[in-house]
Image (cartoon, rainbow, N blue to C red):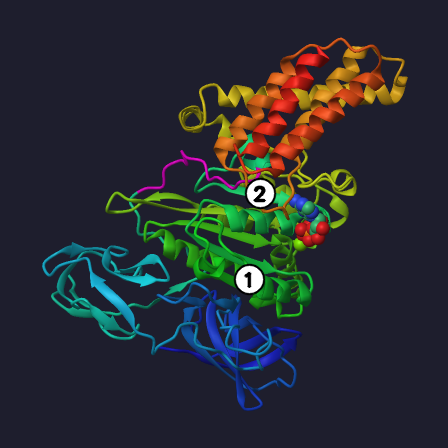
Amino acid sequence: MKSTGKVTGIVSNLVTVLTDGPVSQNELCFIESEGTKLMAEVIKVNGKSAAVQVFESTRGLKNGNTVEFEDRMLEATLGPGLLSNCYDGLQNDLTTMTGVFLKRGEYTEPLDHEKLWDFTPIAKPGDKVVAADWLGEVKEGWLPHKIMVPFSFKGEYTVKTVASAGQYNIDQTIAVLTNADGEDVNVTMTQKWPVKVAIKGYKEKPRPSRIMETGVRVIDTLNPIAEGGTGFIPGPFGCGKTVLQHAIAKQGDAEVIVMAACGERANEVVEIFTEFPELIDPHTGRHLMERTTIICNTSNMPVAAREASVYTAMTICEYYRAMGLKVLLLADSTSRWAQALREMSNRMEELPGADAFPVDLSSIISNFYARAGMVVLNNGQTGSVTFIGTVSPAGGNLKEPVTESTKKAARCFYALEQNRADKKRYPAVNPIDSYSKYLEYPEIREYLSEKVTPGWVEMVEKTKNIIRKGRDANEQINILGDDGVPMSYHELFWKSELIDFVILQQDAFDAIDSITPMERQEYMLKLVLEICDMEFSFEDFEECRNFFKEIINLLRQMNYSEFKSDNFYNYQEKLTNLLNNGK
Ligand code: ADP
Ligand code: MG
C-alpha cells in the first residue's frame, strides 16, 4: 500500500515529512504545491519522519502540504528511442523543448509512444527465458536494438507467443510469457529500472581482456584503456578535459555513447547540446548523435536532479550492454556530482568527512565505477560499458577527496597538467604520472602483442623511460646551464622532446592528426624509437637542437598527412636523408 504524509519542515530542497505508513529509502514521492506536484526522493527515514530531497525549486511550498509516496524508486524508462535524445537527470526530454529548462512540476515522456518500430522476433514459442534474454529486435538508427525479457522478471519463463515481424509501438505487446505458476505476463518494448541499482542479467563479468581504441595517442599508445574498463581525467579548469572527452566520444571504438554532462555553468551544457548534433562520426560518416544519448545537468538545477543524472546515464549504458553492444560512458565532470552529494549531506547535517564531503564518498564513487565492465551474456555473447569520468579538482590539487576517491576506483589515470596546457602541449596529459593498470594484466599484454606487434608493451615502457630520462636531463641543463653538462644530456633531452612533439602532442582540431588508428600509432612509435636508438656526435648543443627541431618538424608534417600517402612518404624520405647526413 502507498503511504502519504504532511510536510513539517523545509530547508531549501530538503523537506521533512510526517508519514502515515512505511516508506523506504530512495522511494519517490510527489509533494503538492500550488496546484502542481513536485517530484522528490526519500533520502533518510527516522521513525515516522522522512527527509525527502525535492528535484526542483521548493519556492512557495508550505508546511502541512500533502505528500504521496509512490512505493517505487527513481526509475529510468528503457526502450527503443533513447538514442539521439537529450535528457535531464530525471529523463525529461530536453530536445522537445525550446530551452534547457522545464517549468516546475512538469515532467515529459522520455520515449515516443506513437512511433512504430520494425520488429523481428528472435525467441520462439516454447523457449525457456530469464530476465534480459532477447525476445526480438528492432533497428534503432542502424543499430540492432534487442527487446529483452524485463530485468525485473524473476525465475524462468516459457515463451507463449511472440509477435510476428511487423511494425509496433513501444506499448504494444510483443510477447506473452508464462511463469512457473502458469500465469501469463505481457511484455512490451519498454520497461523501467531503478537507476541506483545495477542491472544484472548476465552470466559473468570477467576481467577486461581487450583494448578500446580511442585514436588518442597518449591513451592508446602510452596508457591504453580496456574495453569495459574505467578511467578518469583530472585536471584544472581550462586544461582540456572536455576537449579530450569529446575526442574519445567521437573516435572511441564503441557502438553506443552516453554523455553525462554535469556542467559547471549552463552555457557549457548548452554547448554540448548544440555542438554534439553537428558532429560527424568518423567511423560511419553519419551523425554521431544517432548513436548517442546525452544527459545534461547544470549547477543551477536542483541538487537531487544533478545527483541522479550519472545514475540515469549508467542505467541506459547497462541496458545497451545487455544487448551485446559496446557502450562508452563519459561523465564531465564527476566533481559536480560529488558536490551534489556534499550539498545533500550537509543539509542533512550529517557528520561530514574530508572537505565536508559525505564520509562514504569513496564507496559511493567505487560502487558507481564498479557498474562499468565487460560482461558475458546468458547467450555467450559479450557486451561492455567503458567509463571515463573527468574530475575538476579545485586549484588543481590532486590530493582533494574526489580525486583521491576516484583514483581508488578507476584503473586508468590521465592527469592533465597546468604546465603542459600553458605551453599549449595538448592533450596536456602528464606522461609520467599517468598510468593504465591494464598494462599489468597478462591477458591485455598478450592482446597487445597479437593485435599490435610482439614486444609492444616493452616498446611503450622504453618510450616512458626516455621521457623520464629527458626530464632529468632537462633539470640538469636548467641548473648547470647549456654548457655545463655533457652533450649526451642535450641529446637525451631532445630525444624526449621528439617523443613529446610527435607522439604525445596531438591536434584535436585537425581532421587527420586528431584520430590516429593503432596501425599508425605503431608505425610512428617505431620510427621515433629508431631515431632515439641512434647515437649522434654533435659539435655543440645548438647543432643538436637545430638537428632535432628539423626532425621534429618533418615528423609532425607526417602526422598531418594522410597515412602512407605520397606526402607522408615524401616527408619520410626527407627525414631519412637528414638522418643519413646527420650521423
Ligand atoms: P576543461 O574542460 O579542462 O576546462 P577544455 O577542454 O574546455 O578545458 O579546453 C580548454 C581549451 O584548451 C580549448 O578550448 C582548446 O582551445 C584548448 N585545447 C584543449 N585540448 C586541446 C587539444 N587536444 N588540441 C588543441 N587545443 C586544445
Ligand atoms: Mg570542461
Sooner in the amino-acid sequence: mark 1 or mark 2: 1
Q: Residue at x 79, y 42 (%)?
A: 422
Q: Quadrant of residue 507?
A: top right
Ligand 2 image position (quadrant) = bottom right
| Amino acid tagged 2 | Ile
Gap between marks 1 and 2 measured at Cα = 18 Å
> Which type of secondary structure does the marked residue at label 1 adopt?
helix
The image quadrant where one finds the C terminus is top right
> Which type of secondary structure does the marked residue at label 2 adopt?
loop
Q: Residues within 10 Å of mark 2 (few under 14, many from 20)?
A: some
391 relative to 23 in the view: left or right: right
Q: Eyeballing the image, is 47 above or below 482?
A: below
* Residue 196 in sight here: no
Q: Which residue is drawn at 67% across and 16% down?
A: 579
Residue 212, magenta (yes or no): yes
Q: Is mark 1 within 8 Å of ligand 1?
A: no
Q: Does the residue labelled 2 lie within 8 Å of ligand 1?
A: no
Residue 494, magenta (yes or no): no
Task: Give the labeled residue for mark 2.
Answer: 512
Residue 526 has which mark? none
Q: In which quarter of the image is residue 271?
A: bottom right
Task: Give the labeled residue for mark 1.
Answer: 278
Could you say where residue 417 lies in the image, as x and y percent from the top left? 72, 39
**Foreground label between 1 and 2:** 2
Looking at the magenta stretch, what is its main secondary structure? loop
